[in-house]
Image (spheres, rainbow, N blue to C red):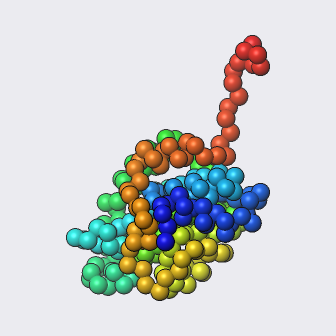
Amino acid sequence: MFRNRAEAGRMLAERLLHYRGKDVVVLALPRGGVPVAAEIARVLDAPLDLMLVRKVGAPGQPELALAAIAGSDGEELVVNPEIAEATGLDAAAIRHLADAERPELARRRAKYLAGRPPVPLAGRTAILVDDGIATGATVRAALRALRRAAPAGIVLAVPVAPAETLADLRTEVDAIICVETQLLLGSVGAYYASFPQVSDAEVIEMLAATRTDVPVPPSPIGPGGK
């Protein structure tokens, strides 16, 4: 379906052009969502920031999303009830697994943002972007954490997702933009010809190359070097 994440981002951007020139912020779920979001931010000439979120994998199956945490300190915990029931884990056990993921959330915040303040979201339209959705637990945690920042509206933009998951997420957002909706989605990567892991260095580079709302302090040296 998509050659790579950048192409997916450009295809989404075409469907978001009506937001160009408006007060919007593009938020990426790292790491895979960053190349997609960077293209959208570039086309819309909008600031790019991160919505830090961390999947909580099922014991012995780390790729299976039991839950997800999001927010500045991972305070937003969303549990995938079907997976929780299948594993037989109770709420206390899930919270314990979530606690183990919070240091990685803090590491990513320190590494990616390096103390940079978040782009203000209150009263603005936030466009949340990932490279695809499988179970929806990670995105739901991000959306609920995002809602706490009091944006004027929330748009979820993803290249590919299951129709049922998108229907479940509609109560969390004001609009959903999805290029390819599937009845069943085995793997997000199956919809990309090239789907490599995105490195920390690439995330940092893309953030540095994209507009932010953080003002640049004036130089202590005046015009003309005086």
Instruction: Name the spot of residue 135 as percent of width and height, x first.
Output: 42, 77
Tell which residue pokes out farthest to the top in this image. 226
Instruction: Name the spot of residue 197 as percent of width and height, x first.
Output: 38, 56
Q: Quadrant of residue 175?
A: bottom right
Q: Nearer the viewer, residue 89 or 9?
A: 9
Question: Viewed as shown, does residue 219 lie left or right of 48?
Answer: right
Tell which residue pokes out farthest to the left in this image. 60
Instruction: Name the spot of residue 144 as percent of width and height, x first.
Output: 54, 70
Question: Viewed as shown, does residue 168 lie left or right of 155?
Answer: left
Residue 178 in sight in this render: yes
Q: Residue at x 44, y 71 (%)?
A: 191
Q: Is residue 6 above or below residue 140?
A: above
Residue 75 in sight in this render: no
Q: Nearer the viewer, residue 79 or 133?
A: 133
Instruction: Name the spot of residue 59 as percent of width and height, x first.
Output: 24, 71
Q: Residue at x 58, y 43 (%)?
A: 209
Q: Nearer the viewer, residue 158 or 89?
A: 158
Q: Quadrant of residue 44?
A: bottom right
Q: Residue at x 62, y 75 (%)?
A: 176
Q: Nearer the viewer, residue 120 or 203?
A: 203
